[in-house]
Image: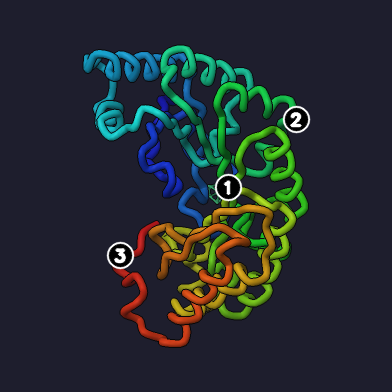
Amino acid sequence: MSFTRPNIIRPPSEWRSYFLPLTSGCSNNTCTFCGYYGSKLQMRDIAHVKTEIDALALFVRSGIRVPDIPGTVYTVAQDWDGRRIFLQDGDALVYPFAKLLETLQYTNEKLPGVERIATYATPQDILRRTVDELKELRQLKLGILYTGLETGHDELLQKIGKIVDSDQVIEAGKRVKEAGISFSVTVILGLAGVEGSQKHALETARVLTQIDPQYVGALTLTLVPGTPLYEEWERHEFHPLSPFQSLEELRSIIENSSFTDCFFSSMHASNYLSVRGRLPQERDRMLRQLDKVLASRDASLLRPEFLRGL
Ligand code: SF4
């Protein structure tokens, strides 16, 4: 089967990266809220990955476009800062380890200006690697891994199909940090609906505290048609939070978590309000910002529903 180039789904901070597909889909395609639900994992032939790296290097060096290389490569390359590469797709760390090493070595050789390589990774992908293996990747400029914790609430983790528990995510985080790779963790506001909101927030704060990552990104749940959670909502079995309830959840996570030095943000387009800052240093300012909006209940201070993105 020929490889299907995935759409670009990326963390906000990777907006200037070059997006290099190694896989398509996600190996853990069972998360009931996610657009990757039911996706078929495809591994890209490494020869094609190298051909793309060659074409990119040639374009960067001399502006020459190679026939037969998809136009997307050049569209992305035109906006590229030349410094960061993001490996697609849903969990590119699942790419066979030897091939991943080869890809990173080739990237370093052909594109020496690249400073940092990043990818999404499931906790399972991370736990399949030893600290020494992760260190090998670090030496080849894999500088950050983005992982979805989504919630620290174990029952909810099971219910939404993550197939890991919070202890495994904590262990994965420790391994990544020990290897010298930055760890960025995503949590999803509203994932437990109205009934589970408080527990979701408190358990998420507990697990974030134990992971103590360098970055936390909060997203707000968006119900995606075709997913089991969307169907639950259609059957009136899932009761989504209101925008202000999701801000209360965000407030509770910030208030109840404790970090050594973490950049915490809700900058993602799915959120109703962008709050960001270093924790613990800026906790009071961030809580004050949230309290002000929560006290006003002024919907005009929030991102309108039609401007929210996935
Ligand atoms: S592991 Fe991540 S990308 Fe894969 S289905 Fe779950 S939420 Fe989606």
Q: Earlier in the sequence, mark 2 or mark 1?
A: 2
Q: Is residue 290 above or below residue 4?
A: below
Mark closer to the observer (2, 1): 1
Residue 130 circle label: 2
Q: Is residue 235 visible?
A: no
Under mark 2, the amino acid is: Thr
Q: Residue at image x 38%, y 41%? A: 8
Q: Please give left or right for residue 81 compared with residue 287 in the image.
A: left
Q: Residue at image x 47%, y 18%? A: 107
Q: What element does badge 1 sit on? A: strand
Under mark 3, the amino acid is: Leu
Q: Please give left or right for residue 261 compared with residue 218 in the image.
A: right
Spatial distance from mark 2 to mark 1, Cα to Cα?
19 Å
Q: Name the spot of residue 148 as percent of width and height, x first.
A: 58, 51
Residue at label 1? Answer: 184
Residue 307 circle label: 3
Spatial distance from mark 1 to mark 3, Cα to Cα?
25 Å
Judged from this view, the residue extending furthest toward the front is 281
Q: Name the spot of residue 45 as percent of width and height, x first.
A: 48, 19
Q: Residue at image x 75%, y 30%? A: 130
Q: Depth check: 280 or 76 in front?
A: 280
